[in-house]
Image (tube, rainbow, N blue to C red):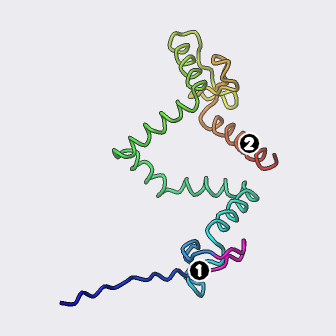
Amino acid sequence: MTILTLFRFEVIMKKTCTACGELKPILEFYAQKGCKDGHQSRCKECAKKASRETRANNIEYYLAYDRARGSQKHRVEARLEYQKTKRGIEASSRAKRKYIERNPEKRKAHIELGNAIRDGRIKKKPCEVCGTKAVTAHHDDYNMPLCVRWLCTKHHAELHKTRRVEFEQQKLFA
């Protein structure tokens, strides 16, 4: 009886990245059908870096794109359906717990304000922009939990949007 042993030799193809100039295994490049060897010319790290730079240089465009994309009817419906599933409920609970862990001062302010409203020490006021009675509280300073601005959902979202854009611009130019 003859035992035949076969040895497996792996040939690892390599390619030079056009951005960083390093010779890397072909698996370090994203697949792209249109290219001669079926992979992009930049390595994954350089492609990611270029993508981050493009987004940072055009942040307002990408924020608008992300908002529009997230508001598409099929995406909204898919999110609502997911939230009803067991995994969606668990994910929501995890996110809430993480938020509370990351923001204990905000949580404390929310609880203190809720208690004050419940006890009648604070009364809700109409939206300070449009006068709508359906409002939420906005804290400018969480160290003063009972000092809030009353805003409808629309104007509260607009305020946070403005602040988010300002924050993104500060990060880019810092």
| Range of magenta residues | 14-23
Q: Secondary structure at mark 2?
A: helix
Quick one: 151 or 59, which is closer to the camera?
59
Percent coordinates x, y for residue 102 in the rendering: 57, 33
Prevalent SS, magenta region = loop
Relative to 108, residue 154 above or below = below
Which quadrant: the N terminus? Answer: bottom left
Amino acid type of disc 2? Phe
The residue at the point 65 percent across, 68 percent down is 47
The answer to which quarter of the image holds residue 159 is top right
Amino acid type of disc 1? Lys
Give the residue pinned by disc 2: 167
The residue at the point 69 percent across, 62 percent down is 49
Percent coordinates x, y for residue 144 in the rendering: 67, 18
Give the residue pinned by disc 1: 14
Percent coordinates x, y for residue 158 in the rendering: 67, 40
Residue sticking out furthest to the left = 1
Q: Residues within 10 Å of mark 1 (few under 14, many from 20)?
A: some
In the picture, measured across the screen, residue 174 lies left or right of residue 142, that is: right
Which quadrant: the C terminus? Answer: top right
Residue sticking out furthest to the right = 173
The residue at the point 58 percent across, 71 percent down is 28
User: Does the stretch in magenta take in 15?
Assistant: yes
Relative to 11, residue 111 above or below = above
